[in-house]
Amino acid sequence: MLNPADARRRWFGSFFLILAAGMLGWGLTFLNPYLIKHPLLFIFYWLSCFFLTVLAFTIAVYDLRVMRKRLRAEQKTAFSKAFSDVEEVEHKKT
């Protein structure tokens, strides 16, 4: 189950990825002639596109780590609950 922090993290990751994809599309089509004529703007534009992509990737990796940690905790809880149920049944038998 996703909590609000998970949803917000995924929304930001998607937002940055969509923004980077939009910049890629615009930079390769409409803005290409303008960017070619202005080298500093060209470098700044593509570095900012790269930065947004790296930011989206970083958020995705962070989300992966959070979800793995949560899954591990849920598995430990389920295992300990199942084990305690088995212990309880064994104690009732004796």
Image (tube, rainbow, N blue to C red):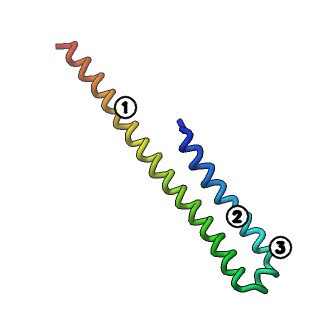
Estimate the x, y position of residue 73 in percent, counting from the top left: 38, 39
CA distance for labels 1 and 3: 55 Å
| Most foreground residue, 63 or 40 | 40
Residue 21 image label: 2
Residue shown at 79% from the left, 78% from the top = 32
Any mark on residue 31, and which? Answer: none
* Residue 11 vertical position relative to residue 76 in the rendered view, above or below: below
- Mark closer to the chain start, 2 or 3: 2
Q: Nearer the viewer, residue 5 or 53?
A: 5
Disc 1 + disc 2, Cβ < 8 Å:
no
Q: Mark 1 packing: few (<14 Cα in 10 Å), some, or many (20+)?
A: few
The amino acid pointed to by label 2 is: Ala
Residue 73, relative to residue 25: is it above or below?
above
Residue density around tag 2, few if under 14, some if 14–19, many if 20 or more, within 10 Å = some
Helix, strand or loop at mark 2: helix
- The percent coordinates of residue 81 (x first, y second) are 33, 27
Write down the residue under mark 1: 78
Under mark 3, the amino acid is Phe
